[in-house]
Amino acid sequence: MELARGHVLVCGGTGCTSSGSAKIIEEFENCLKDKGLENEIKVVQTGCFGLCALGPIVIVYPEGAFYSMVKPEDVSEIVEEHLLKGRIVKRLLYQETVVDEDNVKSLNEVDFYKKQQRIALVNCGVINPESIDEYIAFGGYTALGKVLTEMKPQEVIDEIKESGLRGRGGGGFPTGLKWQFTANSQGDKKYVACNADEGDPGAFMDRSILEGDPHSLIEAMAIAAYAVGADQGYVYIRAEYPIAVNRLRIAIDQAKEYGLLGENIFESGFNFDLDIRLGAGAFVCGEETALMTSIEGHRGEPRPRPPFPAVKGLFGKPTLLNNVETYANITAIINNGAEWFKQIGTEKSKGTKVFAVGGKIKNTGLVEIPMGTTLREIVYEIGGGIPGGKKFKAAQTGGPSGGCIPADLIDTPIDYDSLISIGSMMGSGGLIVMDEDTCMVDIAKFFLEFTVDESCGKCAPCRIGTKRLLEILEKITSGKGTLEDIDKLEELCYSIKNAALCGLGQTAPNPILSTLRYFRDEYIAHVVDKKCPAGVCKALLSYVIDPDKCKGCSLCAKKCPVGAIEGVVKNPFTIDTNKCIKCGVCMESCKFGAISKK
């Protein structure tokens, strides 16, 4: 087999694919063929590199040149200059990798990457996710081989327990303990399942692992099945993840072809098969009992616990359920040992955590950091800070189940216990950054709208209670709220938390409680002053023209869709507040900064 002298890695994750990376791959293959380089340079479709804000991303090795925001029309220049003549195309480089005219930084020297430590994402952006041979070449399936030929099931469980790994799906329950409970349960049939029903707004950690390294999930689930005594597994994944679903299917077929799924794996006598079940996008199916109910073919509604799934889960049998990221840590622990894993992170939160970072931040994307990394490091060192010189106001972790971290707590270490102590939670890993222009009451309303829409309706506290919460928030943001409404809002939050059937309802009030805790003054401003300090809530703002700044150009009047702006050219114009629909077009179009929100 002829070895390639260079590799062109092109991101094939959802973000870059939506920006045209498939066309870029096609262009590279065509251009290389035209230049007679198709046998010298290998084009590899990979998973996510993490820096999604700069996609589509292309990395050329051996130089490690990191090209960002590449367009199909740029490909011929990269081939001609870089791959044929050996001259890196500086104009396309991610500028933070450039030292000077002759030197380029390696990725681990760049701010976005140097504080990260990839365990769950170790192969994402490195291998072709549709090639089992590449996965094996990077150490794939060695952990499964080790487990089946050298370790007893209890030894595997003990290693996971010793590692301190906690569930990455949100609750943070000790993974090894969950495995032990399932192994101890008596039953003629057991199952292992994977929760890939990632539903938090802005979260795409599990999706990216499946798109970039699907075999890591298959191998980990096989190890888990061996440890707990199961022979059948299910991956429950939302149908809105077509790339992830397709690559997982390819990986399962390849594993079966190689004898790594099916009967007598590694001639050990261990049998394990794996199937996919597609979800229809119901957020409540991220709750473990609702997920299992859905796999069984019923409407996805939660069941009372106990009994817990480890005792009575899928089809009434003992079932082990972890999410994708939790499983993605298993092979590293088996290969490197529990002691190695324990050295990473904090005393009670071992290892790393993957976050999908979005919102008002420069470097949106996927990051994997050691537990204990502070929020400040994520926002300013890895994330590149807030665009436009704006001030950091808060960060939301845990999605609709989480809470907001205010600016004065920006040095909080990110781990399970620290986040809970300040009224937030880890959640599955969504991290939304907000700047000074964000209204915290509106943020709470946004998450409540999501929760109300996603409630399965089985229990009254969630079905009715969240709707009442939303009505109070709508009343406050429309300028009709009272101080009594704030008290009522808080009281109802605690009632719902204590009475709801499942985690969705129990955590639904968290965004309200955390914003009340740290930003109560904004709620008071909405009900007492009838003003939105951030200028977001339309019912509480008005647009005004400063007569001293207005040049009378009439552009705002021409742009206004409802004719609410009147005046004479070369004289100050005015806005009729009764006609104004508060769309903001006038302020956007004014070239003199004469229009402002109040």
Image (spheres, rainbow, N blue to C red):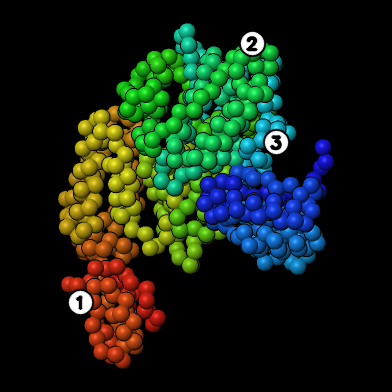
Which amino acid type is marked by label 2?
Gly
Nearest to N terminus: mark 2 or mark 3: 3
Q: Image point 68% across, 17% down: which residue? A: 266
- Quarter location, residue 545: bottom left
Q: Image point 29% across, 33% down: which residue? A: 456
Q: Nearer the viewer, mark 1 or mark 3?
A: 3
Residue 364, percent from left and from top = 52, 54
- Quarter location, residue 212: top right
Residue 586, percent from left and from top = 32, 75
Q: CA distance from mark 2 to mark 3?
A: 26 Å
Which residue was labeled with disc 2?
Answer: 269
Q: Nearer the viewer, mark 2 or mark 1?
A: 2
Tell me, for residue 181, which label it has, or none: none
Residue 11, percent from left and from top = 61, 49
Which amino acid type is marked by label 1?
Asp
Tell me, for residue 134, which label it has, or none: 3
Name the image quarter holding the C terminus: bottom left
SS state under label 2: loop
Q: CA distance from mark 1 to mark 3?
A: 66 Å
Q: Image point 29% across, 90% down: which residue? A: 569
Nearest to N terminus: mark 1 or mark 3: 3
Observer-nearest of 511 and 367: 367
Which residue was labeled with disc 1?
Answer: 576
Q: Is residue 185 left or right of residue 9?
A: left
